[in-house]
Structures are given as C-alpha cells and as structure tokens.
Image (spheres, helix red, strand yellow):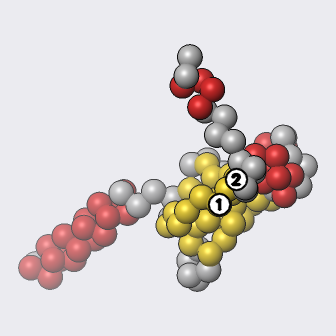
Amino acid sequence: MIFFILIFFILLKLHIINLFKMTVHGYYSAKQHESNKIGYEYLDDDGNIVLLSEVSPYKRTDDELIKFFKDNYYKGEFVKYIRQVKSKDYVDKREKFEKV
C-alpha cells in the first residue's frame, strides 16, 4: 500500500512540474526574419541552438502555416529560450505606440 502511495506522489510531482514547463511551437521563414530583422534562439531537446523567426503557443497546420510567409516551416517544440538576435538595422516598432 505504501508503495502505491509513493508512486502516486511521484507521478503527481512530475505532473505539477510539467504544468509549469511552457512549450512553444517554433517556426522559421527567411522572408519573415529578413522583414522583421529579428530572430529568436531556442534550445531543442538535443541541446542544439535553433534560430526561429516566430514562436507560438499554438501549432499551425497546412494553410495557417504559410498564410503570411510562403517559406514558413515548422521547426518543432521548444521549452528553453536563449536570446533575441537583432539585425543592426532593427527598429522596435512598439516604441512609436508607447510614445503616444
């Protein structure tokens, strides 16, 4: 009986940890990256750094995937954000809205 209670608490702890582990879906489009002049580096499950042009909590499929950028493709699920990669001529478009 104690064995089953112990297993129950271990599984419960693992489930609670996974609830706080946010997974995002990563995409890459060279056109989007060039247009926005910003990319995002994430770590994949194998420990490789992957450059993404977009991340989303939702997985896009079929027509949704190429709705805005025809060269967009799905790169997988990611949990570890590394950093932003900005081009030298990057301009934060949010700044003009914050000054109003």
Query: Residue 38 shows which numbered tag?
Result: 2
Q: Specify the quadrant that holds the C terminus.
A: top right
Q: Specify the quadrant that holds the N terminus.
A: bottom left
Q: Earlier in the sequence, mark 2 or mark 1?
A: 2
Residue 48 shows up from this direction: yes
Please, what secondary structure does the residue beneath circle 2 have?
A: strand
Please, what secondary structure does the residue beneath circle 1 have?
A: strand
Q: Which residue is mark 1?
A: 85
Residue at point 61%, 49% (across, down): 56
Q: Nearer the viewer, residue 33 or 16?
A: 33
Q: Residue 49 lies in what quarter of the image?
A: bottom right
> Which residue is most to the right?
70
Q: Specify whether 83 is left or right of 69.
A: left
* Residue 67, image x, y percentages: 84, 40
Q: Specify whether 43 is left or right of 28.
A: left
Total labels: the figure holds 2
Q: Around disc 1, counting alpha carbons within 10 Å, would you say few (fewer than 14), some (14 to 19), or many (20 or more)?
A: some
Q: Nearer the viewer, residue 69 or 8?
A: 69
Q: Residue 10 lies in what quarter of the image?
A: bottom left
Residues under numbered marks 2 and 1 in contact, where contact means CB atoms less than 8 Å apart: yes
Residue at point 36%, 57% (across, down): 20
Looking at the image, is 34 positioned above or below residue 77? above
Q: Residue 9 lies in what quarter of the image?
A: bottom left
Residue at point 53%, 66% (across, down): 82
* Residue 12, image x, y percentages: 25, 65
**Circle 2: residue type:** Ile
Q: Nearer the viewer, residue 20 or 52?
A: 52
> Which residue is most to the top?
100
Q: Nearer the viewer, residue 30 or 61?
A: 30
Looking at the image, is 85 positioned above or below residue 47? above
